[in-house]
Amino acid sequence: MELFIKYPMALQLTRAHLEAIADHGARDYPSECCGVLLGNDTGLLKQVRELAAIRNLRQDQALAEELLPLAQPELESERNRFLMDPGELRRIEAEGRRRGLDIIGYYHSHPDHSAQPSEYDREHAWPWVSYVIMKIEAGRAGDYASWVLAEDRSRFESEPIDVVDVQAAPESA
């Protein structure tokens, strides 16, 4: 008999955070946009405090191929793949830590595709981290969802999102 019931941890972010992700996705359309969720994990709730937008290096094919070549270049592009600059990620993580924030997740858009993670997303994800995906249809923000990779890496599990109304605009790292 189990003594404890394991409830899924929720990801808490503000309406302003969602609007910033939607604006980033619309701005980068038809390419995927990407960014970092900075905040704190209380053990019961992951609280997003800031977003850090990152340029999708897939928009620079030569640089992207040097860092992480595509398996099927004829089928893959910045429209269905993103690549974050490792140096930029280290800078964002260091600046966040100085302010008491951790990388608790990532976001990216799916241009003209659902807010469901792809097999490629699963192959490149880490367990326990939140992955917010926003559908951008014809340049306009659509559905969004958050996902967490199962510990055995076999599948994504839906993560509840708690959207709070806060008037302050999200900060960027």
Image (cartoon, helix red, strand yellow):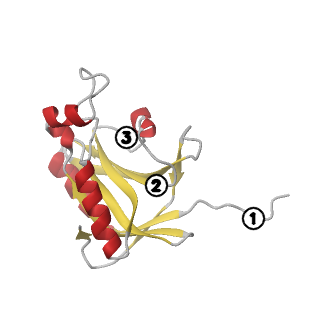
Within 10 angstroms of label 2, few (less than 14), some, or many (20 or more) residues?
A: some
Of labels 3 and 2, earlier in sequence is 3
Residue receiving disc 2: 129
Q: Residue at x 44, y 33 (%)?
A: 119
Instruction: State yes or no: discs 1 and 3 in contact (Cβ < 8 Å).
Output: no
Q: What quarter of the picture does the N terminus occupy? A: bottom right
Q: Is residue 16 visible?
A: no
Q: Residue at x 31, y 58 (%)?
A: 36
Within 10 angstroms of label 3, few (less than 14), some, or many (20 or more) residues?
A: some
Q: Residue at x 27, y 62 (%)?
A: 92
Q: Secondary structure at mark 2?
A: loop
**Residue 83 found in image quarter:** top left
Q: Is residue 5 above or below residue 123?
A: below
Q: Secondary structure at mark 3?
A: loop
* Three-letter code, disc 1: Phe
Of labels 1 and 3, earlier in sequence is 1
Alpha-carbon distance for marks 3 and 2?
20 Å
Query: Image check: 4 left or right of 120?
Result: right
Residue receiving disc 1: 4
Q: Secondary structure at mark 1?
A: loop
Residue receiving disc 3: 114
Kindly report which numbered mark, 3 or 2, lies closer to the viewer in this rendering. 2
Question: Which residue is at the front of the view, 15 or 5?
Answer: 5
Instruction: State yes or no: discs 2 and 1 in contact (Cβ < 8 Å).
Output: no
Of labels 2 and 1, earlier in sequence is 1
Query: Image check: 140 left or right of 98?
Result: left
* Three-letter code, disc 3: Ser
* Three-letter code, disc 2: Val
Q: x and y percent of residue 106 in the render? A: 36, 54
Alpha-carbon distance for marks 2 and 1?
22 Å
